[in-house]
Amino acid sequence: MKIVITFGTFDLFHYGHLRILERASKLGDKLIVGVSSDVLNFQKKGRNPIYSENERIKIVSALRCVDEVFLEESLELKEEYIKKYKADILIMGDDWKGKFDYFNRICKVIYLERTPSISTTEIIETIKT
Ligand code: C2G
């Protein structure tokens, strides 16, 4: 059984999020998703997510292509998460290209192409203006 793991905030869940999760799930038998905590999101992006971690976890858990979800509390814990969930493949969007090659020691690292023209930041900007 091939286990796939991926990570993300998935705030204002949109089509780009759905597409990466669907493609990731097809690369293995089980898809596990680490959803960034509110605190981690603030550290990464300097703002709080619109949807809370509990809401984001519920949305991602409800997807047919997702088998298991956990709270990603720190970027530094990636190796522990990969080992804990016995992941064979780590999937990241290509905005992270090269950043996780280090984990090739313990699993296969694959970057998938981002879906063009959609992002949480753009959605927020469009609604504001
Ligand atoms: N994504 C995508 N296409 C888009 C937007 C996002 O394929 N148009 C992908 C991203 O590449 C990422 C996933 O959807 O793999 C989640 O995106 P974000 O919520 O923006 O995730 P991010 O905050 O980059 O968190 O530990 C790593 C981080 O937790 C990744």
Image (cartoon, rainbow, N blue to C red):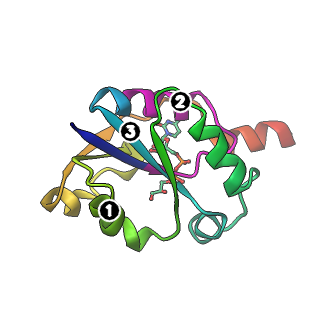
Amino acid type, mark 2: Leu
Please provide the residue range marked out in magenta: 7-23
First along the sequence among labels 1 and 3: 3
Q: Nearer the viewer, residue 69 or 102?
A: 69
Q: Does the magenta stretch include residue 64?
A: no
Q: What residue sits 60% from the left and 33% below the top?
A: 62
Q: Is mark 3 on a helix, strand or loop?
A: strand
First along the sequence among labels 1 and 2: 2
The reply to whether the C-beta atoms of the residues labelled 1 and 2 are less than 8 Å apart is no
How many residues crowd mark 3 within 10 Å: few (<14), some (14–19), many (20+)?
many
What separation in Å lies between label 1 and label 3 (alpha carbons)? 14 Å
Compared across the picture, whether 65 is left or right of 10 comes to: left
> Residue tagged by mark 2?
18
Amino acid type, mark 1: Lys
How many residues crowd mark 2 within 10 Å: few (<14), some (14–19), many (20+)?
some
Q: Eyeballing the image, is 123 above or below 37?
A: above
> Residue tagged by mark 3?
31
First along the sequence among labels 2 and 3: 2
Residue 66 screen position, x and y as percent: 47, 35
Amino acid type, mark 3: Leu
Q: What element carries label 2?
A: helix
User: Mark 2: is the Cβ under 8 angstroms from ligand 1?
Assistant: no
Q: What residue sits 58% from the left and 27% below the top?
A: 15
Compared across the picture, whether 77 is left or right of 17 comes to: left
Q: Which of 65 and 11 is in front in this view?
A: 65
The reply to whether the C-beta atoms of the residues labelled 2 and 3 are less than 8 Å apart is no
Query: In which quadrant of the rendered view does residue 106 lie?
Result: bottom left
> Residue tagged by mark 1?
84
The reply to whether the C-beta atoms of the residues labelled 1 and 3 are less than 8 Å apart is no
